[in-house]
Amino acid sequence: MPARSCVGAPRILPPESHVEALPFQTMDSMSGEITYITRGEEVVWGIALVAVSLVIHGLGMILTLHITPKYKRLFRRPEAFFAGITSVVLASWMIMVVHILEVAMWSAFFQWKECFPNYSTAIYFAGLEYTTVGSALNLPRHWRLLEIMIASAGLLGFAWSTGVMMTLAQEFQDQQLRVLKVLERGARRRPAPAVSDSPNEPGEH
């Protein structure tokens, strides 16, 4: 019985005319698409816009903390649950307005620099970048650094807002827990109705 050869059958390669060339780009050919050089104007404007954004946010947070207690004092019982929870909701609305104002400020700058065809597109882009969601749109190449700047401003703003909301929410929770403790103590101190050991028979006086 003839021994089997360990060498497999020769592979038949297709003619060169049938081989499709794969698309391939060298780094040299891509360098024109990814090259980016930071400009001093970008840095200056980015720092200034972040500062303005934080000033707007700071004023908004102070106003929120100032108005919320005044709102609660409009109620006859400021410690009541409804007064407390609606004050927290009011604070959240005010914080949202502050964030929207910051987004509008950034988008106004983009529109001033003609980065987008209209203000609606600018505010849509600024909102996505400010909330760090990210956008398929991009700024012109000479303003690309501001995409990082606006995301940084958004992170700082949301961190600040979280601190304010935590302060108001903690105050509301502590107040409601104190009210519950007072109600529990009142229920414990309330004397139980006396029960007679020998109840009167019917007809007895």
Image (cartoon, rainbow, N blue to C red):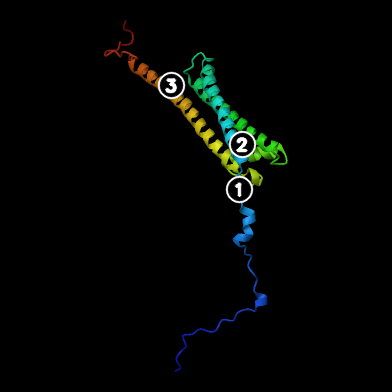
Q: Which of marks 2 and 3 is nearer the N terminus?
A: 2
Distance between the Cα atoms at labels 2 and 3?
A: 45 Å
Q: Return the residue at label 2.
A: 45
Within-10-Å neighbours for mark 2: few <14, some 14–19, many 20+: some
- Which residue is at a point 59% across and 33% down the rendered structure image? 48
Q: Of the residues shown, which amino acid type is indicated by label 1? A: Ile
Residue 175: which numbered mark, if any? Answer: 3
Q: 151 above or below 186? A: below
Q: Residue furthest front?
A: 40
Three-letter residue code for mark 2: Trp
Q: Give x and y (percent) for residue 39.
A: 61, 43
Quadrant in the picture for the C terminus: top left
Asked where in the image residue 29 lies, by quadrant, the reply is bottom right
For the residues bearing labels 1 and 2, Cβ distance under 8 angstroms: no
Of helix, strand and loop, which one carries label 1?
A: loop
What residue type is disc 3 on? Answer: Gln
Which residue position is annotated with label 1?
37
